[in-house]
Image (cartoon, rainbow, N blue to C red):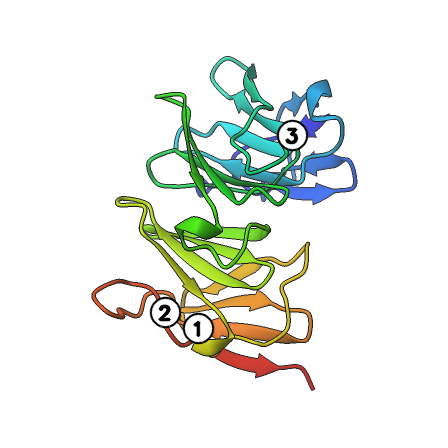
Amino acid sequence: MWRITTNPFGNRREQLLGRFLVDARFDGTRGPIIPQLPQLLSAAAVVAVDNAGNIWFSRHGIARYNIASAKYDMYIDSFPFIKLPDKQAKALVVDNQDRIWFSSINNGLILYDPVKKTFRHFTKNDGLPDNAVYALTVLENKVWAGCYSGIACVDINDFKVTGFGKEDGLPASNIEQGSRFFYDSVQQQLYLGYLTAIARFNPLAPVGGTMCAASPARKSRP
């Protein structure tokens, strides 16, 4: 079962604890319980909220819980693929146009438009460092993707992909499954954990006419 509500500031706060999504108001009260969707098979890997307040879940496919109708109104488990199809969806984010960006195991990055019901597929051939995408985040008009061997950003308007690797100052080690982005909005620094280091850079710094960072700073563990 899932529990969801809205806090006094109009934002949602979700926390995945074991098999449950707990979302509580700051005053300690709780909202309605959302039933878990059997097709997802397990607890959601990632939870995201669109501009309408609908809840998106990823695990065995992706699903949308419609807040207005109080029920699941979308479930998708057939995605674009490279060699072998896989129904597992991992990292997931929603951009400011309410389009869904998510990763499928070793099948790159996938964009789904729920209004047009169309997919767009991004792979190493499009500029990703590789096809294993473990972490995603959205900042302004860019989607940042943490891949096994590096980082990429995708412009959500023209879909230009720019990839970064160790030659750009990133750690020589790899990004592991479970890594997550963290953005410090005060210092304008985006962080991502590698196996033996932490990458830190300004994702808003213009480089070559774009807003992508070309030389992220490396900060090794002691």
Residue 80 image label: none
Q: Is residue 96 left or right of residue 73?
A: left
Say if 82 sits above or below 172 in the image.
above
Label 1 to label 3: alpha-carbon separation: 33 Å
How far apart marks 2 and 3 lie (CA) works out to: 32 Å
Callout 3: few (<14), some (14-19), or many (20+) C-alpha neighbours within 10 Å? some
Which residue corresponds to the image point at 44% horizontal and 73% vertical from the top-left? 201
Q: Earlier in the sequence, mark 1 or mark 2?
A: 1
Are there few (<14), some (14-19), or many (20+) residues within 10 Å of tag 2? Answer: many
Q: Find residue 87 and name its label.
A: 3
- What residue is drawn where x is 68% and y is 29%? 60
Q: Which residue is mark 2?
A: 213
Residue 213: x percent and y percent? 36, 69
Quarter holding residue 39: top right
Residue hosting label 1: 201
Asked whether the beta carbons under mark 1 and mark 2 sit within 8 Å of each other, the answer is yes
